Image: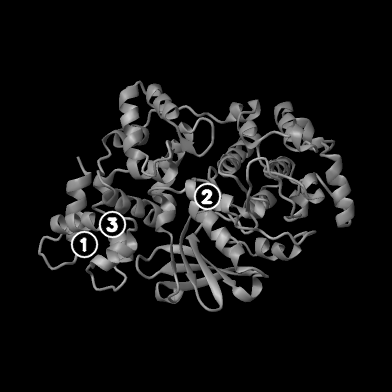
Amino acid sequence: MGCCLSDRSLDDKNKKTKASDDKRKNTKETRLQRNSSTKGLNKGSFVKSSKSSVHKNYEMIRTVGEGGFGKVYVVKDKRTSAIKAMKEIPKINVDNNKKVDEEIDILKELDHPNIMKIYEVYESSKSYYIISEFISGGELFDKIIAAKYISEKLAAKYLHDIMGAINYCHSRGIVHRDLKPENLLLDSKDENANIKIIDFGISERLKSDAKLRETIGTLYYMAPEVVKGEYDQKCDVWSAGVILYIMLCGRPPFYGNSNLELIKCIKKGPKMTDKIWNSISAEVKDLIHKMLAVEPADRLSAADVLAHPWMSSYINNTIVDTKISLDALSNLGTFRAGNKLEKSILTFITSQVFGEKEEAELAELFKALDANGDGKLSQEELLNGYHQLKWSSPEEVKEIMKKCDTDGSGFIDFTEFITAATNWNQILQKEQLISAFKMYDTSGDGQLSLDELKNGIPGIKDSEWAEFLNEADKDGDGNISLEELKEYLTKKVLV
């Protein structure tokens, strides 16, 4: 039920193999786990849910997907002219509305450069509408079909994107359960485009040492233990192994004229007897065998896949001494947003206004710094990055961590990194600030009232708002104009 841009993946929803009626439950422990991972300021705080009409803010351009669970559209944000995607899920097509809520909660929480970003959620009496980023490069499935097979170098790049995102999900107790090429979109038409994972409609939270028992997913990519009905997060590694196999030879590893035949083939594990495998390296064949080990205990974890020698031979995590790297790391050191209000405004811009164009180069730097591929930067990883450029000291890095870790997790998450590494001297002079202002300005009168500000920036104390108005409201009319907001942020944020 994710915001995918594929009618194929939507239609596949009707073909899911489902062997039990297990219901997902919001236990107290699960809720506590969820709350503990989202304390403080994070991008999910700015994903608003509204019961107003979605058509007030979005103009439908075209339909790009349709299936049993709903439709996907390309839409235009009337406030900012930004192109986005909109997934409409009619309530009549959903057995349990809590499942949609759970998907939305997961998408709000996830903050990774290779996972689809959502912006807003609307709910009417008949449907849910999930607004997400528009991912323009098409499905990995279509790229494989067009190319027949993909080089080892490009396959390693794609697998690194996929497993980095999956490792991040697993570290947060989230299992995707439906990895397949149709749910992997490319963020552009370029040869080196990045993968974005979509469709978390059947993803699930998994408590430590627990097992999932619902046989669900797409059979061609389904791990043997999922068919049995007792599995954990390693089912995603199996699915990624099937995808790697297909990328390299252009065909799936498992066949059958019926579901029963296909399941028997899956339980035997992969074979690599076709002639095409003669020209493929022993290292990647070793990785495939270890990802497609029939017994989960013998299978690699997502972190193990990222550390495999074949991946290491193609993926270079060295920080390149380029202007973007130098500027971004310099910006981290001079990041000045002092209080929660200032950080909230900047985080809102990076999470709600920035698109792939603004994030692309910084996303590559983030992934290069993220040595273990867990989707967040530790103090040690940041220090290693600075050391590669012979720059900064442990004391300075410790101070950078303190300033940039806005949610108090002990790590720098992706949006936190983008926020702190951005050149705000440029952004505050460009259309991004105007777009943010228009999104705050729900009345459309060109002025931000205190109520509009409080609605758009949650968690700020009344005393902080009073201090903000005293400093930012130059004409004393009780509202904030675009120029007043720009002047305030320029004074507070720029060095």
**Residue pointed to by mark 1:** 482
The quarter of the picture where the N terminus appears is: bottom right
Task: Tell me whether circle 2 and circle 3 mark residues in contact (CB < 8 Å).
Answer: no
Q: Position of residue 219 (x, y in %)?
A: 78, 53
> Does residue 9 lie above or below 425 as drawn?
below
Assess disc 2: are there few (<14), some (14-19) or many (≥20) residues with their C-alpha within 10 Å of its C-alpha: few
Label whose residue precedes the other's in the sequence (2 or 1)? 2
Q: CA distance from mark 1 to mark 3?
A: 8 Å
User: Residue at position x 37%, y 51% from top?
Assistant: 350
Label whose residue precedes the other's in the sequence (2 or 3)? 2
Task: Tell me whether circle 1 and circle 3 mark residues in contact (CB < 8 Å).
Answer: yes
Assess disc 3: are there few (<14), some (14-19) or many (≥20) residues with their C-alpha within 10 Å of its C-alpha: many
Q: How is the image coloured?
A: one colour
Name the disc covering residue 116, or none.
none
Label whose residue precedes the other's in the sequence (1 or 3)? 3
**Residue pointed to by mark 3:** 433
